[in-house]
Image (cartoon, rainbow, N blue to C red):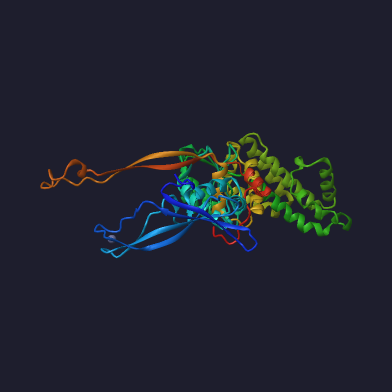
């Protein structure tokens, strides 16, 4: 073994390259592969030596400066097929001009560190680190799979510049996968990664018609539940409309205080502090219309607190009567939504999932967006899955039989059994993931320990 600890090479002494001021710029090492391996070009190969070329490969650094291997590579010409061939260089990644050991080190560190850190540690520039990571991740996650959760949540979110469908395990609060798009075919394609579809008993979604169609089509036995969170958001929306039209009519003294109260107005009475309640109540006292709208919104929240489906049915009926009394035009759109999604909305009372989880997820995704602004989607997805999801490699035994030729008389006996039935078996490697808590990703992004944004790197 030579001093570089790369067998298969004859290795020269290291050369230090310095600038005028004597600063070390890089270390060069001359290497010559000591085997004359060449790929096969044709069956009548006739090789003639055709000069050598020096190819540079970056290696792990020996010192503070980057180390570059200058490999002398033999070239050949094949007299039969006229192709040019090159001597095989061991231990290198020929596509990226790095040694395999440097590539592997960069890739493993990239999962745990930011790409900027990699530059400091390995002297590989950030762009190269990203390229090596993506090549590795694409290979590693090509067969990424996860088990179907019992309660599957699907939601679309604006994430890194486009609408993405996010799949989660609602019961455990885990994010399982993110799809680059959110159309029905994007989701259908993405769900191919999921095993054991029969596990899905509850499918939680917002009020997107195409997801409902998908659920009915792919998971006919699952109960579809519309997310409480999305409906409460809607109730807030219609209440806000009244608030916005009524605010200018408030006495100046009261109006002055309202701009700082926008967030407060979106809260549920019960989650507010006593002081906050007093502030809201004070504003509402000046506008009967606002007061009524607020109360209708609040009683819609209470409808969702109903302990059983029967209670919910009657609570909803009461709510409609109350809202209709003198604000029918304000609340009609919400009533129509409930009518259109009645079955899925009331399914919630049999399968009370979502809300907290989806709400938290939405907040985390908001944080991910803010902190990951400019990061490309595929790198974010790959890095998040590789870093946080417990990935367990699994091998699946695949067997493909070529169809046996029909016995047709004269061939019988000429062909042996092996030729009759050609068999091709191989093991396919899978990565089975468990998903991860999106708030950890959001926190790492926020802290800058996940990654810095990359501008102009296609996603
Ligand atoms: Zn040839």
Q: Quick one: which residue is furthest to the front in this view?
A: 13
Count the numbered circles shown. Answer: 0
Q: Which quadrant would residue 175 be assigned to in this image? A: top right
Quarter of the N terminus within the rendering: top left
> Where residue 86 appears, x then y in whole percent?
37, 59
Whether residue 122 is visible, yes or no, is yes
> Where residue 113 appears, x then y in whole percent?
60, 47
Q: Is residue 229 left or right of residue 277?
A: left
Whether residue 154 is visible, yes or no, is no
Residue at position x 75%, y 55% in the image: 242
Q: Quadrant of ligand 1?
A: bottom left
Q: Is residue 312 above or below residue 59?
A: above
Q: Quick one: which residue is furthest to the bottom in this view?
A: 82
> Where residue 166 appears, x then y in whole percent?
56, 48
Quarter of the C terminus within the rendering: bottom right
User: In this orientation, which residue lies closer to the viewer: 70 or 443?
Assistant: 70
Q: Is residue 59 left or right of residue 23?
A: left
Residue at position x 76%, y 42% in the image: 269
> Where residue 384 appears, x then y in whole percent?
57, 46
User: In this orientation, which residue lies closer to the viewer: 282 or 409?
Assistant: 409
User: In this orientation, which residue lies closer to the viewer: 417 or 24?
Assistant: 24
Q: Is residue 352 left or right of residue 31?
A: right
């Amino acid at each position: 073994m030579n001093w570089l600890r790369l067998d298969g090479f004859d290795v020269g002494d290291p050369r230090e390259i310095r600038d005028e001021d004597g600063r070390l710029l890089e270390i060069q090492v001359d290497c010559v592969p000591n085997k004359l391996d060449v790929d096969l070009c044709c069956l009548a190969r006739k090789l003639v030596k055709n000069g050598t070329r020096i190819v540079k490969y970056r290696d792990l650094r020996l010192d503070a400066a980057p180390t570059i291997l200058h490999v002398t590579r033999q070239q050949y010409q094949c007299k039969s097929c006229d192709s040019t061939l090159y001597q095989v260089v061991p231990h290198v990644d020929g596509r990226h001009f790095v040694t395999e050991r440097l590539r592997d080190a960069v890739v493993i560190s990239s999962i745990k560190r930011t790409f900027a850190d990699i530059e400091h540690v390995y002297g590989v520039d950030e762009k190269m680190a990203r390229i090596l990571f993506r090549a590795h991740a694409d290979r590693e996650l090509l067969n990424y799979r996860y088990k179907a959760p019992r309660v599957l949540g699907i939601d679309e979110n604006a994430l890194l510049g486009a609408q993405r469908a996010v799949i989660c395990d609602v019961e455990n609060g885990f994010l399982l996968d993110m799809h680059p798009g959110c159309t029905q075919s994007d989701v259908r394609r993405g769900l191919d990664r999921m095993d054991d579809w029969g596990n899905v008993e509850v499918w939680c979604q917002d009020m997107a018609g195409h997801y409902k169609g998908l659920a009915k089509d792919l998971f006919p036995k699952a109960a579809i539940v519309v997310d409480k969170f999305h409906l409460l958001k809607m109730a807030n929306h219609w209440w806000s409309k009244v608030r916005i039209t009524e605010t200018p009519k408030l006495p100046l003294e009261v109006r002055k205080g309202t701009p700082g109260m926008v967030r407060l107005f979106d809260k549920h009475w019960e989650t507010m502090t006593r002081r906050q309640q007093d502030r809201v109540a004070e504003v509402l006292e000046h506008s009967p219309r606002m007061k009524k709208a607020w109360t209708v919104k609040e009683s819609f929240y209470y409808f969702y607190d109903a302990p059983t489906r029967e209670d919910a049915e009657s609570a909803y009926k009461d709510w409609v009567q109350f809202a209709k009394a003198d604000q029918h035009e304000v609340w009609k759109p919400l009533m129509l939504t409930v009518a259109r999604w009645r079955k899925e909305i009331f399914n919630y009372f049999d399968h009370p999932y979502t809300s907290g989880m989806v709400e938290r997820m939405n907040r985390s995704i908001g944080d991910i967006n803010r902190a990951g602004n400019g990061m490309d989607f595929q790198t974010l997805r790959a890095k998040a899955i590789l870093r946080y999801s417990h990935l367990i490699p699994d091998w699946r035994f695949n067997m493909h039989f070529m169809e046996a030729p029909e016995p047709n008389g004269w061939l019988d006996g000429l062909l042996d059994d092996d030729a009759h039935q050609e068999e091709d078996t191989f093991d396919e490697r899978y990565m089975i993931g468990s998903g991860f808590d999106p708030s950890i990703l959001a926190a790492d992004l926020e802290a800058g320990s996940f990654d810095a944004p990359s501008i102009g790197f296609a996603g």
